[in-house]
Image: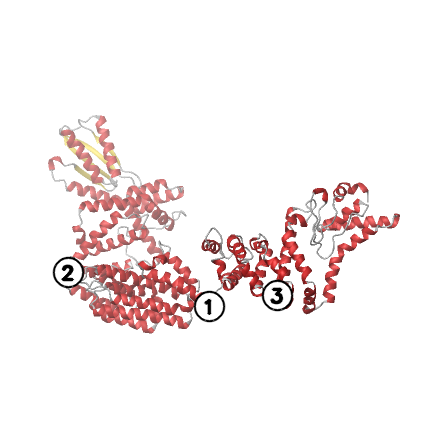
Amino acid sequence: MPRKQFTSQASSGRAVTGFGGAFGASTGSTFGATLSPLGYVTEPPDFSSISDPNTVVSFKNLSKKDSTTKAKALEDLQSILSAHIENGPEIEEPVLEAWVGFYILGAAQESLKQVFPTQDKLNNVKKAYQQPILEYCRDAITKETPHTLSDERVVSSDEAEAKYVRVIATCLSVIASLLSELQPEDITKQQAVYDEILGQSSVWEFAASKDVSVRRSVYRLLRICLSKQYDTITVNLTTISSAFLSKALVSDQSGSSYDFVETLVALTNVCPTVWTEHYTGKKSVTSRLRQFLKRGSSDGPPEVWRLSEEDQRRVAVQMLFPLLAQYIKPASEGTQWTLQGPQAMTVLREALQTGLMDATIDEHWAQMSDTLIEDVKISLPEQSKDFDKSQTAVATEGTRWATVQAEILKLDLTESQRAGLTQSMERVLRESFKVLKSRNGKPYGAAGVVDATIRLCGHTLFEDPAMDHLVSSFVMHDLPSLILSPSCTTLMSILYSFAVHEGFPETWKTVVDTVLSASDSPVKLAALRALLYSEDTISTVAYMTGLRQPLAGTKTITRTCNELVADLTGLNINGKPDECLKQLVLLNGIIQNQEDATESIAKQRVVFLVKHITSWLQVGYLAGLLDFTFDFLGHARGRPVDASKFDLSSYTPDTESSPEKDTQWLLTHLYYLSLKHTSNLAKTWWIDCRSRQKVISVESWTERFISPTIVADALTSASEWAAAQDNPDEALTVKVSPRVREVTSSYVLDEQNLVFLIRLPSAFPLKQATCEGVNRVAISEQKWQSWLRNCQGVIAFSNNSLPEGLASIRRNILGTLKGQS
């Protein structure tokens, strides 16, 4: 191989006095570095006696990690050696020594296994060489650095760091191995060296190393030392506390979290003062521990948080059950366990799902249930000034108790635990029923407990035959006699939750008879309202229909109607769309069944309600309905349905041959109503529609099926208005021509007729009505055209009302005659 090929590398090779092998390295004195005393098993090969710099460089390349570099170095060495063999001179002895040095480590390891094949024989070797091994590890840990172990000219900083952590991890593991495998009497012989090593703060500070292998090695060493070197550990507890609690606890433990936690537990069990008197950190150790816990398991296994049964019981009793107790019944002495805000139940749910409470849940839950029962029994009587406060508190406590009970029942419980929880629920219901019956339904807090339990735990409750019988017996035999009490609202909720039971119809009839036969009183009024209000709005409307005659003219209906109007006027449909729909349906149900109920509503209140509801339509709700309507009716496909067989002015459900036709009828009827009562909004949707095909299809379909009825209604309203004019001297003469969709109005002035014509287009009201002047008398052209525009505008902005347009014409004529401009 040509000499010039190695020139640049050889220049740096001359400065190297030793070669860093698998465990130690040396750097040349040219750079002022010190020579590492570690040679691992053998001394580093000495290249100083090799005269050929190219050979030195090839040997150095053999120490590189890169396999390509090593292969190239071997090829170079083979070429050099072959040239020496063929052409001379003879191969130098230092070259042969260097070659042997590279392979002596592998050969030594293989020979060691062959000579000492068993663990006992290897332990004898460790026993014999314990002192040099310990001293070797001590020097590596206390004296070596990444720069002393590697040649910075040929090894990158990352490679140097990797070599260093391998050395440290190996040394720590070797020390731990000696302590765990050698007999105590053998360890005692080198106790001074062990004390020296374990007394070094640098050893324990590796607990916060960035390398996971180093951290795991030092954790294993400490666990072994806790049993094998207790005295030495106790002497150095302050140092260990600083390393593990001040530094390691807040450092990254990814990949070593399980070992770290296991070590902390062992250290705490053996030396608990490491957390207290031996802790010297500026920041409190609890805050550091909290910071560690917040980071979670740091990619560790689930066993990181594994607790013994005793620990689980202790955590549950001391930390988790107080959370439940404070949530169910807040107490001033337990404010530290109070969960604030809407996330309280989420926190409790997560606490329950940890499984830490499973072992003792039935025992402690029985105690919490007993507390609730006691509060139900001692709730204040109706005569007390704090009666409402007491009953509300009991109802709230019962609701929270039932909420937690429902979450507990979702857990993976044993049969005995589930049976215990069921017994607690049965006792709560039984005692609440007793209180309600003995105090004639007055303690509505007890009724609230029952209602919440049935509502939140009904699935489990009704699956149990004993509890199903308990609740059914109360509802069928006791509830009707208690309905006229302060608990009436809650008792009705309990009754409606019983709706699927076969005994419900008879019980409901008994309750209705009881309420209606009672004399008028605030309690009866409240019971009637509770009777009408069901969680299911459709059911409520059905009850109103069924009770149409008994409810006619009652204060309940009148008051309910007024309250619904007031509530709807103040509701924001964007914030509470479901509530708006529910109240609209209820109001419509009352109006349909009790026509006289609306007479008690102030006219101004009705006007405000109509304006408020109309504003809902203006924000896009009608547009969404119409989009769906015409997509369903086939206009988007250009094949609209034939609506000639539908009665536009009314709708009767479930009378068509199929659900599809029934829906088509309903949507056609709704479109008719939107054109009749909110024509401007429907017209705006049609104008803004982006589909040209849909616009054309809707116009022609409306003209064919809808407009004739709308036009007929409009012309009829014009005739009725004309007939209702009360002053013949000021009346307009109105003539309606249905065949040509025209309304002609005239007024006699100076024995001549002022004649106006209102013409409705065939697609009315999608197309606007027009107003034309037929005969002008004694009126200037400018004023005449102003009257025509005014009439047309009034019709357009009054929901296409022809009477409003005719009235505007009459006002203009009479105003002019009276000298008004």
Instruction: Give SS at disc 3.
Output: helix
Instruction: Give SS at disc 2.
Output: loop
Decide which of 86, 282 is in the foreground and name it: 282
Residue 550 in the image: state x and y as whole percent.
Answer: 17, 61
Q: State if disc 3 and disc 2 touch (CB < 8 Å).
A: no
Amino acid type of the residue tagged 2 in the rendering: Ser
Comparing marks 2 and 3, which lies closer to the viewer? 3
Residue of label 2: 521
Instruction: Give SS at disc 1.
Output: helix
Residue 324 in the image: state x and y as whole percent.
Answer: 36, 62
Vertical order, 467 against 235 (above or below) = below
Q: Is residue 676 visible?
A: no
Vertical order, 501 against 734 (above or below) = below
Residue of label 3: 180
Q: Is residue 741 visible?
A: yes
Q: What residue is drawn where x is 82% and y is 48%?
A: 80
Disc 2 from disc 1: Cα separation? 60 Å
Decide which of 671, 736 is in the foreground and name it: 671
> Looking at the image, is mark 2 or mark 1 earlier in the sequence?
1
Comparing marks 2 and 1, which lies closer to the viewer? 1
Q: Quadrant of the C terminus?
A: top left
Residue of label 1: 309
> Looking at the image, is mark 2 or mark 3 earlier in the sequence?
3
Amino acid type of the residue tagged 1 in the rendering: Glu
